[in-house]
Amino acid sequence: MRSFASDNNAGVHPQVMEALQQANEGHAVGYGADVHTERAVEVLKGHFGPQSEAHFVFLGTAANVLGLAALVRPYQSVICAETAHINNDECGAPERFLGSKLVGVPHTDGKITPEAIAPLLESRGFEHHSQPAAVSVTQPTELGALYSLDELKAIGEFCKQENLRLHMDGARIANAAAALDVSLAAMTRDVGVDVLSLGGGKNGLMYGEAIVFMRPGLDTDFRYVRKQAMQLVSKMRYLSVQFEAMFGTDLWIENGQRANAMARLLAEKAGAVDGVEITRPVETNAVFASMPMQAIETLKQEFFFYVWEPTRPEVRWMTSFDTTEDDVERFAAALKRAMDT
């Protein structure tokens, strides 16, 4: 069964698998003191600048939590969209392990603005309230929307003005860069992002994410934080060689472009089926649609996907780097059959 539920469900890109196999030859010093990790760090410096520092961890939740851990103290708070992954889909991990409060604010398709953040700063200096210290944005958002560079720059400038740190959850950042046709640095470092959770697992890696600190001093003592948080990989070469293969070539952007193109095709084909409404703009690799629940249940017998909002009902279909035109055609045909039932 092909999946349109999540880009996590896709396999490993063949070039990444080949890199893993090559890294498996011989012995290598553990815990990151190996040539693959050294090269992967240099590769990411090539994207984000020589002043940046990258640290590899197993998964996205760890990247978000530990990235934020470098920015806030337990009595401080992190401002994010109400829909943010850190707020809704990480089982309270940020609040448990940071000891800091997450404060969700109103949004438009998952995007927040300086105007939404500003009212929360009124609690500064009042010892009975958590003290706002960081803002977290997701690019693209959980609802498939893209921040423009101008929107990100406005948030970055506001954070600098208000002495707030800016974190970006970039689990699907390759899709965002492909859609905006910009470099990774243009969408992060250049707009004021302090720490990036750089995604890989949704774009063709077997596992692994990177925490990228944009400026010196932000990752002071971070190696101890990572170890204490149980995210220091002993056989680091198998994690870092994937980043070397992905970001040391154009594979990361090609995969993002492919997934985005398949989402546009899927939206076109699905939207042409009577009774199916595409409910949100298709900006990256997410397609949201509304259709009768009976048809949803029928379609799920052939394809795996999630019901996003049962009351509408609204579904979410995700494409991946390995989604093919044939996959989309077969899905659209099954969708039409389900709607005709």
Image (cartoon, rainbow, N blue to C red):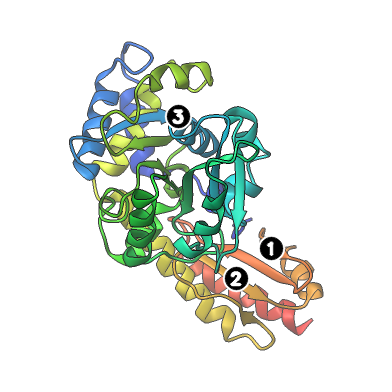
Q: Residues within 10 Å of mark 3 (few under 14, many from 20)?
A: many
Mark 3 or mark 1, which has the lower sequence index? 3
- The Cα–Cα distance between marks 1 and 2, rounded to whole angstroms, is 8 Å
- SS class, disc 1: strand
- The Cα–Cα distance between marks 2 and 3, rounded to whole angstroms, is 31 Å
Q: Nearer the viewer, residue 16 or 168?
A: 168
Quadrant of the rendered image containing residue 332: bottom right
Please state which amino acid type lies under the numbered disc 1.
Trp
Please state which amino acid type lies under the numbered disc 3.
Val
Q: Is residue 244 left or right of residue 169?
A: left
Q: Nearer the viewer, residue 326 or 32?
A: 32
Mark 1 or mark 2, which has the lower sequence index? 2
Q: Residue at x 50, y 63 (%)?
A: 111
Q: Which residue is mark 3?
A: 57
Q: Which residue is mark 2?
A: 288
- SS class, disc 2: strand
Quadrant of the rendered image containing residue 163: top left
Please state which amino acid type lies under the numbered disc 2.
Phe
On screen, 145 above or below 23?
below
On screen, 103 above or below 4?
above
- The Cα–Cα distance between marks 3 and 1, rounded to whole angstroms, is 29 Å
Q: Which residue is mark 1?
A: 308
Residue 79 spot, x, y in % from top left: 54, 49
Q: Residue at x 76, y 75 (%)?
A: 295
Label 1 close to label 2 by CB (< 8 Å): yes
Q: Residues within 10 Å of mark 2 (few under 14, many from 20)?
A: many
